[in-house]
Image: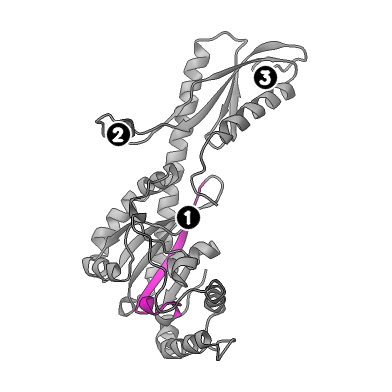
Amino acid sequence: MFLSNSRDLAVDETAIGAALVRFQRGDDRVPRGVRPVIEESWRRCLRVGIDPVTPRVPRHGEAARPRSARNQELLEASHAVMEQARTTLEGCGTMLVLADATGVVLHAAGDDNALATAEGVGLTRGSNWSEPARGTSGLGTSLYLGDALHVHGPEHYCRTHQRWTCSASVVRDPVDDGVLGALSVAGPSEAFDPHLFPLVLASAAAVRAALSEQEDARRKQLLEHALALLSRRSTTTGLMLFDRRGAFGTRAGPRSLGAQRGSRGVVTLLVARPVARASDRGRAAHRHDREIPRHPAELFLEGSRATALQAATRYLFRARTDRQPDHPR
């Protein structure tokens, strides 16, 4: 985690601003009095050619691009945190911003004045606040680092953002620990408070906990479906359960995987996958996305457990290659 003492931020603000100007002019390639994490970010911004005066403006219509299933899950998991921010940050001059793993803003809530000021610098839903797009910032640089970070005033690479202070933390997947997005408590520089950093850390932890609950619910649903299916079948039928990531969950049935060499039987693969929203299919319905097991695929297996697993792996590989990735890399 990267955070400076609030007194240091206030005292060094003028010096940091002067160091940035010299650095951008090429007069000082080793800016003095600047935190190493900020200096490294400035160097990345310089290498990719970010204009510190007029940074990249999001393309028209970017805010209206369709949300991926993963972003929708992130939004649902962060709902309680964002609602709390709407009330607790009112009158504090700050707001809570949620962005996806690519730096695109999904939602913002908090003080009305902060939200209105944010619109003036292009911090709105659908805008891209990745580091390559907007330079050094709490959201973009924390996503680049995969860590929590505070960026204050002139530490921002672009002049239009230097009146802001922001504490940000990434939100990680509770299953594979991958970065799903980031949260940032942001506001005008004068709204800086050292308590904003622990606030954003706690908010990110709460979202991760909600994501974990969602994952547990999906696995429970898959297991319940499998048990119901097993109860209607003979004891020679086996079940192999995989989650939507292709991770092996469990197996059921006394001879489900052909434990004895030369045995024969049917193994049913249940693979959880997202289903389309009813509204996307043109029907007037107002229900949330949910995970259901896909139509079971029955494989006639012969041989050992290893043979069964090989067949399952081939099937899952074909199923996963048919899926579109949530985030283009």
**3D distance between C-alphas at marks 1 and 3:** 39 Å
Of circles 1 and 3, which is in front? 1
166 w.r.t. 107: above or below: below
Of pointers 2 and 1, the one earlier in the residue sequence: 1
* Residue designated by label 3: 257
Who's the residue at 42% across and 77% down the image?
158
Q: Amino acid at mark 3?
A: Leu
* Residue designated by label 2: 279
Label 2: few (<14), some (14–19) or many (≥20) C-alpha neighbours in 10 Å: few
Residue 200 on image: x %, y %: 40, 63
Q: Nearer the viewer, residue 58 or 122?
A: 58
Question: Is residue 166 rendered magenta in the image?
Answer: yes
Which residue is the extreme one toward the top? 234
**3D distance between C-alphas at marks 2 and 1:** 26 Å
Label 3: few (<14), some (14–19) or many (≥20) C-alpha neighbours in 10 Å: many
321 w.r.t. 205: above or below: above
Instruction: Evaluate whether residue 148 shows in this view.
Output: no
* Residue designated by label 1: 101
Of circles 2 and 1, which is in front? 2
Which secondary structure, mark 3? loop
191 w.r.t. 7: above or below: above
**3D distance between C-alphas at marks 3 and 2:** 40 Å
Q: Nearer the viewer, residue 157 or 197?
A: 157
Which secondary structure, mark 2? helix
Question: Is residue 129 rendered magenta in the image?
Answer: no
Which dot marks residue 30? none
Question: From which residue to which does the magenta span run?
Answer: 155-174
298 lies left or right of 102: right
